[in-house]
Amino acid sequence: MSGTSGAVPARRAVIDLDAFRHNVRTLSELAKPAETMLAVKADAYGHGMVPLARAALESGASSLAVLDIPAALALREAGITAPIFAWMHDPDALFGEAAEADIDLGISAVWQLDAIAAARASVAPRVHLKIDTGLSRNGATEADWPALVTAALEHDRAGAVRLHAAWSHLADASPDDDGLALAKLRRAVEVAEGLGARFEKLHLAASSAGIRMPEARLDMVRFGIAAYGVSPFDDQTARDLGLRPVMTLTAPVASVKRVPAGHGVSYGFAYRTEGETTLALVPLGYADGIPRIASGRASVWIGGRRHPVAGRIAMDQFVVDVGDHPVEPGDEVVVFGEGDHGEPTAEEWAGFADTIGDEIVARIGARVERVHVEGASGGGGR
Ligand SMILES: *Cc1c(COP(=O)(O)O)cnc(C)c1O
């Protein structure tokens, strides 16, 4: 998707690679001596997978996490040679291709090990056995764990896999719940060792526990959202944590008009102008990931100040009441950004939309061009 055809408004998500590198450095220093695996799943939370993967590896991450094998193979095709971990597999998953490409596989069930063996690849992939410590997504239950470990040991002996790690994922429910999950992981490791397994690595924490629960860092932290400059916490912003928002969402004003008092705006006339005012049209809507539920609550940055979103956010556009401020077609609208100047952040949009900042950035749609920038503060760019 390129926004360069002249007729297409330049909806842009500007991705600040310097900010991202700063965050990865900050988090990987914090986690040490634990290693940092950087989650670039879901197209790097909407930021663009390949450039963010490269930047992560340049800045302190030693490996990458994606959801599934196709994403891992795309990273390999882009020339990335670092370890890549993928953990969501269905029965038709490309286990043979994954093995040939030396992808680390998260394994939750015996049938996955059997499918890897059946693929008869020339490389035995490293496997990370997952125990469900309470989140109830994938991962073996306590009851199924010994059978999973036994099968992994058999396939390891037969040369089909290399048993590498044991891992789980936290529910971030409460410190007590997360402490219990850590204890369950440790117990599962004891059970596995009793069966003869030896793990080179244990991993559990993502951003939240990686920052606040040092005992959960183990050998490796799988950082995600914090590296994109969005806080995993309700009570601290990214800025409070010394992290910088990475994505700035902008679009040009598409049109402006002067209207009288009492003028209805957008579907359902949920908004009426209080007095004579100027309305500015912004070419972004819920098809681009702007949450419709934020109608009537959100504000955006135009011409050096905040202005309220007026009326319902539509599929492709929303209207902003800019009062008597001079706004022209083509003026830049910052929907969210770093927040330094007073523009909203993705975290604030999460508040406007009763969600988390992760959802705000990850849902920015395909019509929005991703523009990766670096060296903006005098470093000379690429
Ligand atoms: C998404 C994800 C992460 C990263 O989580 P954040 O909360 O974004 O840091 C780590 N591990 C797994 C298994 C994940 O699905």
Image (cartoon, helix red, strand yellow):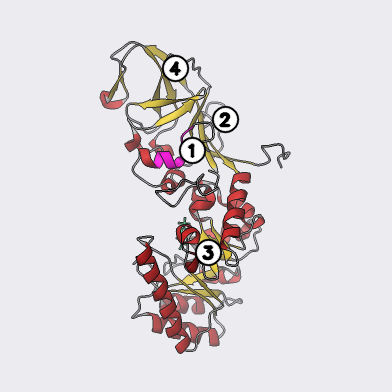
Q: What is the spatial separation of the Cα atoms under label 4 and label 1, in whole angstroms? A: 22 Å
Query: Is 340 located above or below residue 40 in the figure?
Result: above
Q: Is the residue marked by circle 2 packed among few (<14), some (14-19), or many (20+) residues within 10 Å?
A: few
Residue 28, numbered circle = none
Residue at 50 percent across and 17 percent down: it is 328
Specify the amino acid type for callout 1. Arg
Do the numbered discs 2 and 4 sit on residues whose CB atoms are within 8 Å?
Answer: no
Residue hosting label 3: 221
Q: What is the spatial separation of the Cα atoms under label 2 and label 4, in whole angstroms? A: 22 Å
Label 4, secondary structure: give it.
strand
Q: What is the spatial separation of the Cα atoms under label 3 and label 4, in whole angstroms? A: 48 Å
Residue hosting label 2: 5
Residue at 51 percent across and 28 percent down: it is 9
Specify the amino acid type for callout 2. Ser
Dot placed on the residue nearer the N-terminal end, 2 or 3: 2
Specify the amino acid type for callout 4. Val
Do the numbered discs 1 and 3 sit on residues whose CB atoms are within 8 Å?
Answer: no
Residue hosting label 4: 256
Q: What residue range appears in magenta?
A: 343-350
Residue 367, numbered circle = 1
Q: What is the spatial separation of the Cα atoms under label 1 and label 3, in whole angstroms? A: 33 Å
Specify the amino acid type for callout 3. Val
Residue 29 image position (x, y, % from top left): 61, 59
Q: Using the image as rendered, state which of residue 218 and residue 277 is in the foreground.
A: 218
Is residue 311 in the magenta section?
no
| Majority secondary structure in the magenta region | helix
